[in-house]
């Protein structure tokens, strides 16, 4: 390992993070629908899942999952089902069009933090492509014989970068909520988010492993 390879990895990881995916859609919807608190905890859930999968890959456990085709497929289809569930929820919200006033996080009902964390964590942990990413990418930057501490440092760096980006996203979306407070706009946003989540689920279902 060298500082040069570490810097290159960070740039590569940042480029991948900036590409919208299921995590982006979940954090966006939770922030716009329920405010900064739920959006922040969604971001934390995504980050914890990234860290878990990165450490599993570094410890060699991830390779066992990927090599076990039935287990890999079970995780993949769980991810498809969960993204479809979230997408249908967004569509139902758009169809009903019943939205509470945007009074800020203080008026949010109890359980928003746990719900946000759960949705962020599950949207990421049920995507086996994340685990496959760590297994495919880390050796390219650290070599096949790198110690566990180095692999873990690279994996956790990716998780931290993801958290920073998602928190910036949450902050920007939270400020935009007042602009997007009209009922028609919120219905369109829910509808588009539902389409995105269902699209990500369909892509996950049809990708070859």
Image: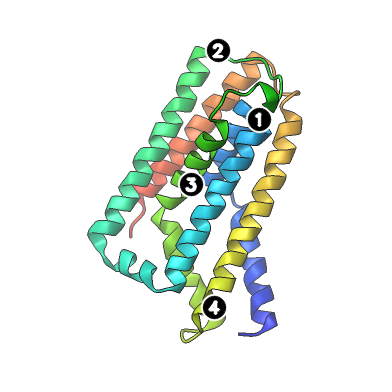
Work out whether residue 51 can be spotted: yes
Q: Which of marks 4 and 2 is in front?
A: 4
Q: Tag 4's secondary structure?
A: helix
Q: Are the residues flagged by discs 4 and 1 in contact, CB closer than 8 Å? A: no
Q: Which of marks 4 and 2 is nearer the N terminus?
A: 2
Nearest to viewer (mark 1 / mark 2):
1
Residue at the image point whose x is 43% and y is 36% from the top: 198
The local crowd at label 2, few if under 14, some if 14 to 19, many if 20 or more residues have their Cα within 10 Å, is few
Q: Residue at x 55, y 12 (%)?
A: 98
Mark 4 vs 1, N-terminal side:
1
At 47% from the left and 50% from the top, the residue drawn is: 124
Color style of the picture: rainbow
Residue picked out by circle 3: 121
Q: Mark 1 points at which residue?
A: 35
User: Marks 4/2: CA distance?
Assistant: 50 Å
Quarter of the image containing the N terminus? bottom right
Height in image: 76 above or below 108?
below
At 30% from the left and 58% from the top, the residue drawn is 72
Which of the two discs, 1 and 2, labels the residue nearer the N terminus?
Answer: 1
Q: Do the residues labelled 1 and 3 touch (CB within 8 Å)?
A: no
Residue behind mark 4: 149
**In the rendering, which numbered label is found on residue 98?**
2
Say which element carries label 2: loop
């Amino acid at each position: 390992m060298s500082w040069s390879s570490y810097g290159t990895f960070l740039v590569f990881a940042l480029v991948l993070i900036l590409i919208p995916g299921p995590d982006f859609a979940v954090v966006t919807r939770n922030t716009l629908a329920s405010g900064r608190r739920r959006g922040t905890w969604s971001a934390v859930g995504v980050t914890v899942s990234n860290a878990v999968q990165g450490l599993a890959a570094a410890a060699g456990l991830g390779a066992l999952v990927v090599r076990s085709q039935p287990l890999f497929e079970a995780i993949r289809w769980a991810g498809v089902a969960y993204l479809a569930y979230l997408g249908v929820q967004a569509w139902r919200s758009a169809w009903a069009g019943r939205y509470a006033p945007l009074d800020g996080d203080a008026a949010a009902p109890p359980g928003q933090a746990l719900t946000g964390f759960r949705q962020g964590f599950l949207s990421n942990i049920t995507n086996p492509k994340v685990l496959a990413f760590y297994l495919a990418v880390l050796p390219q930057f650290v070599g096949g014989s790198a110690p566990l501490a180095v692999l873990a440092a690279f994996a956790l760096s990716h998780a931290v970068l993801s958290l920073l980006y998602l928190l910036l996203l949450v902050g920007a979306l939270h400020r935009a909520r007042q602009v997007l407070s009209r009922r028609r706009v919120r219905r369109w946003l829910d509808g588009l988010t539902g389409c995105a989540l269902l699209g990500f689920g369909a892509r996950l279902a049809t990708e070859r492993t």
